[in-house]
Amino acid sequence: MHILLVEDDSPLAASIAAAMRAQGWRADVSDRGEPVPASLLQDAYDVLVLDIELPGIDGLETLRRVREQGSSLPVLMLTARDGVDDRVRGLEGGADDYLVKPFALSELLARLRALVRRHELRRSEMLVLSMLSFDAGARRAQVDGQPVHLSARECIVLQYLMLKTGQIVPRDQLAALVPGWDAATSANALELLISRLRTKIEPGGVRLRTVRGLGYLLDAAPSP
């Protein structure tokens, strides 16, 4: 993951960047908002972490300029302001998430992972694996050309599993994507969803496997 962090508090910026790099992520740091729009055009970032209270143009104006140039990059705002009006202004200005200082670095990292996963889901359109297809825009699945009825939660889980075909997806990643669920969601609830989904999609020549202790893996079923 490649992250642009815009934060003028040098000690805080250094600790955040160090935590990001410890995850194996690339972190570029700026203490001002003015260079941000040009930086986003020059480099392929996965997410922007943007403080509101910056010298020069503030974070909200920086965000406005970023969105004005057509960028759909996920943006997480940082601020010491905890008023509802400030959060609303940030979200209405195009921010995807909002974190009030002081915060735990572990929460920041978790939110960034979830932001990037949700952005991946938005970018995917038509996904195909064997005889299974999923139209993300219409939220429709088909097996061998026949429609398959999926719940909203099943759609979210299937879309992400298809994006990660052949890879083991940890259960907490899936739970974090589902509205109303989080890492505390019981393993039984997710396994029940997976079981229902498996019944619906495996006739399409795919396998949805539970990898004990690790997560779930979707791939093409082996030829008979």
Image: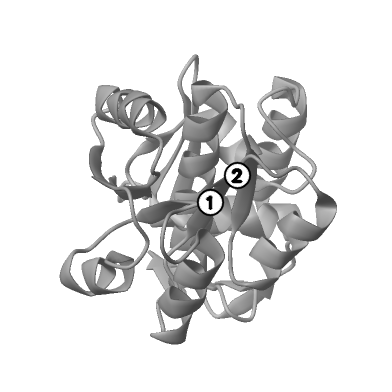
Q: Residue at x 73, y 62 (%)?
A: 150
Marker disc for residue 53: 1
Q: Is residue 26 above or below residue 48?
A: above
| Residue type at the position of mark 1 | Glu
Q: Position of residue 106 (x, y in %)?
A: 51, 23
Q: Is residue 102 above or below residue 161?
A: above
Q: Position of residue 107 (x, y in %)?
A: 57, 28
Q: In the rendered view, does 188 fall on the left or right side of 167? A: right
Q: Is residue 32 above or below residue 183?
A: below
Q: Secondary structure at mark 2?
A: strand
Task: Count the marks.
Answer: 2
Q: Quadrant of residue 93?
A: bottom right
Q: Position of residue 214 (x, y in %)?
A: 45, 20
Give the number of the mark in front: 2 or 1. 1
Q: In the rendered view, does 59 fall on the left or right side of 193? A: left
| Residue type at the position of mark 2 | Thr
Q: Is residue 204 above or below residue 220?
A: below
- Work out which residue is located at the far top of the displayed protein and give it: 213
Q: Is residue 133 visible?
A: no
- Residue nearest the observer in this picture, 47 or 184: 47
Q: Secondary structure at mark 1?
A: loop
Q: Residues within 10 Å of mark 1 (few under 14, many from 20)?
A: some
Q: Is residue 44 visible?
A: yes
Q: Position of residue 141 (x, y in %)?
A: 60, 70
